[in-house]
Image (cartoon, helix red, strand yellow):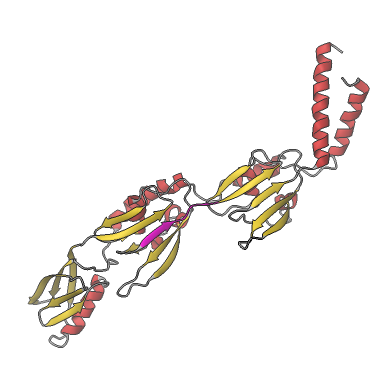
Amino acid sequence: MLPMPVLAGLILLISSCAMFLPSCAFGPDGYQRIISNAYSNGASSDRLNSELIKRAMTAGALASTADYRIGPGDLLDISVFQVDDLKSTVRVSQAGGIDLPLINDVKAGGLTTAELASAIALKLRAYLENPVVTVFVKEYMSQKITVLGAVKTPQVFTVSGQKYLLDMLSMAGGLSDDASNFCIVQKQGGGNGQAGAIKIDLNELLVKGRADLNVPLNSGDVVSVPEAGRFFVDGAVGEPGSFQLKSITTLTQAISMAKGLNFEAARKIKIYRDEGDGRRKLIVANYDSILSGKSPDFYIRDKDTIIVPRNELKALLKGIRGTIFTSTVAVGKEGY
């Protein structure tokens, strides 16, 4: 038990030292700012799935076959305006061709209905003046589209008719809890379609409703949803641990996800970044400078490790404060 004069001296010492310590993250302004921004860095899987259901229903009502690319086995109705003798119902061969009155071996596979109508009209100009051709898909043959990665039911889906990205994500049961906020669509091409990979931001598609990102899919296309990255926070924070990097996350948001800085936390935070070649880069950030707007906040990357060191003076003061509190309680109990 400490004598009362000693307790009074220690209290005075703590009050004096506190005047020279940097402002703590738990101050009203700084703490409130980072907490309010902690989860503004993107939609969670639950929110994305909720938006997926709504968008898929809307897109289904507005779906068009204009983007559909004809495949082997499809049954086509083809007509020529005011020329009934040229009306035909033909099935696309496994090689992708069709035969019509007056013209044979017309390539149909990989073309849209509009592209095929133009190709037929071009060939018919040898017999007719400005023929107007209409092509309609009467029966769709099954197609195979693959959805892989962080979805609830990844598999190869057998579908018919024109499908879009929203359709396939819905058929795959939506996003899993560890899904990233983007997906990769690998297009196989064919006809005038272009092969290649397309990166789709799911926040832009589902939350902001950008219909142009709801890309049409055809047989052989692959949709891949990567798992979210992870970063790590350790040291003088409320809850050290591993956290999902689902979307754009800044340092202050990362600290908030770890329940903020403890009283004894130092203000210079260390970030160890994996450079991908076996090396780790050290970044030192001044947390108070970021909170005050003097230094820019910066983005956390996959596999970053954030270390919040302890300020030894603060740790000492915290220990003294605890001792004073314990001693004061003991003094009160003994009636001094």
The residue at 39%/47% (across/down) is: 152
Query: At which x and y percent is residue 249?
Result: 59, 52
Please state, as top left, top right, bottom left or bottom right, where the C terminus lies in the image.
Answer: top right
Could you say where residue 264 lies in the image, as x and y percent from the top left? Answer: 76, 39
Name above or below for residue 9 compared with residue 134: above
- In front of the other: 3 or 304: 304
Q: Is residue 74 left or right of residue 86?
A: right
Q: Main secondary structure of the magenta part?
A: strand
Question: Residue 6 lies in magenta, yes or no?
Answer: no
The image shows a total of numbered marks equal to 0
Q: Residue 73, percent across and down?
A: 18, 66
Task: Give the quadrant of residue 328.
Answer: top right
Farthest residue, direction right: 5
Q: Quadrant of residue 1?
A: top right
The stretch of residues the image draws in magenta is 222-229
Residue 301 falls left or right of residue 197: right
Q: Which residue lies at the image location 65% right of the left edge and 42% below the top edge?
A: 32
Kindly give the residue lying farthest to the left in the view shown.
Answer: 85
* Residue 215 horizontal/vertical position (percent): 37, 63
- 261 in relation to 284, above or below: above
Name the residue located 72 percent from the left edge and 39 percent from the top edge: 262
Furthest residue to the bottom? 126
Which residue in the rendered view is the most extreme toward the top?
A: 335
